[in-house]
Amino acid sequence: MSTDDPSPANPNPRHIAIIMDGNGRWAQKRFMPRAMGHQAGVKTVRKIVEYCANQHIEVLTLFAFSSENWRRPENEVSLLMALFMATLQREINKLDRNNIRLRFIGDRSAFPDKLQKKMADGEMQTAHNTALTLVIAANYGGHWDICQATQKIAAKIAATELTEQDISEALINQHLSTADLPEPDLFIRTGGEQRVSNFMLWQLAYAEMYFTPTLWPDFDQNTLEEAIKSFKGRQRRFGHTGEQVLSQSVTLQP
Ligand code: IPE
Ligand code: IPE
Ligand code: MG
C-alpha cells in the first residue's frame, strides 16, 4: 500500500469499555428521583449487551459502581445494590441462553454476602459460554486493581516463587483482574464528563477515547455505532509514525 492511500479502516474493536454516566442527570432533567435514572440505565445495558453480542464484539466492560461511589448518600448506595441484585436475578439465565459469559471485576468483598453469592453463581453458570464476555466492573477502581496485583506479586516473592527481577509489564498484566482479556481498544464515556474516574488505568494505556454528551439512559445502538465509526476511522500508531503504519511494515500492538 502506498503512503498516500487513505488510512485503512480499523476492524471492529475487540474490547469496548464504557463508563455509563449520566443516569442521575437524566432523571433530574425529568424532575424524577435519581433512582429512576438508574432504572432507565439498566434498560440501556440490556440493549447495548444485545447489540455487542450480535456484532460479535469479544468483550464489553461496563463500569457499574466505582470504589468511590460509596461516597454517595446511603439511600442511593442501597438502591444501587438492590438494583444490581434484582438485575442479576432477572438476567443471568437470559445471558446464559445467549451464550454470554458474565464476569465481575472489582473488590467484591465489600458487597452483601447474598450479592457476592449471586455474582459467583452467575460467573459459574456462564463460564463455558463462548460469545460475548460481559465484564461488570463493580466496586472497581484502577488503583485497586494495580494494588491487588502488587499484593499478589509480593506474596509470590515472599514465598520465593518469584524474584523482583521477574517483575515485568507482562507479569503485572497477568495479575490484574483482566489478565485473560484483550486490552480495551475503544473507551466510551457517556454523560459529557471527560475524565477516567479511576476506571481501568493500566489497561486503557492505548485505548481510543470517545466522549459523548449523551446521557447513559439515552445511549442506544445509533450512538454506539457512531462511537465505533469514529474508532474505525482513526489511525492507531502505538508510537510509530503514520507513514510506518500506512506502509504496514510494523506490527501494531499496545
Ligand atoms: C452513573 O450515573 C451511574 C453510577 C455511577 C452508578 P450517575 O449516577 O453518576 O449520573 P450523574 O453523573 O449523576 O448524572
Ligand atoms: C463513574 O461515574 C463511575 C461509574 C459510572 C460507575 P461517576 O459519576 O461516579 O464519576 P465522577 O465522580 O463524576 O468522576
Ligand atoms: Mg456521574
Image (tube, rainbow, N blue to C red):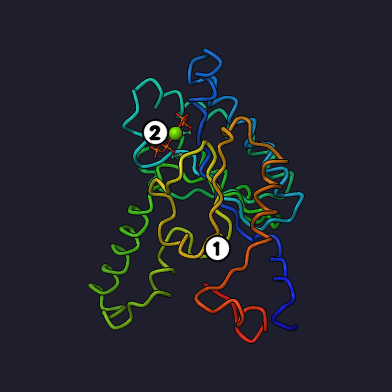
Kind of residue indicated by mark 2: Pro
Q: Is residue 114 visible?
A: no
Quadrant housing residue 222: top right
Element type at marker 1? loop
Please identify, in this view, whether the residue under mark 2 or under mark 1 is nearer the observer: 1
Task: Name the residue carrying label 1.
Answer: 181
Give the residue at x 52% y 12%: 31
Instruction: Return the residue at label 2.
Output: 112
Q: Quadrant of the N terminus?
A: bottom right
User: In the orientation shown, which residue stands out farthest toward the bottom?
Assistant: 249
The image shows residue 234, relative to residue 250, as above or below, that is above
Quarter of the rendering containing residue 74: top left
Q: Earlier in the sequence, mark 2 or mark 1?
A: 2
Give the residue drawn at x 48%, y 46%. Answer: 137
Percent across and percent down for residue 138 are: 45, 42
Out of 56 and 101, give the one closest to the viewer. Answer: 56
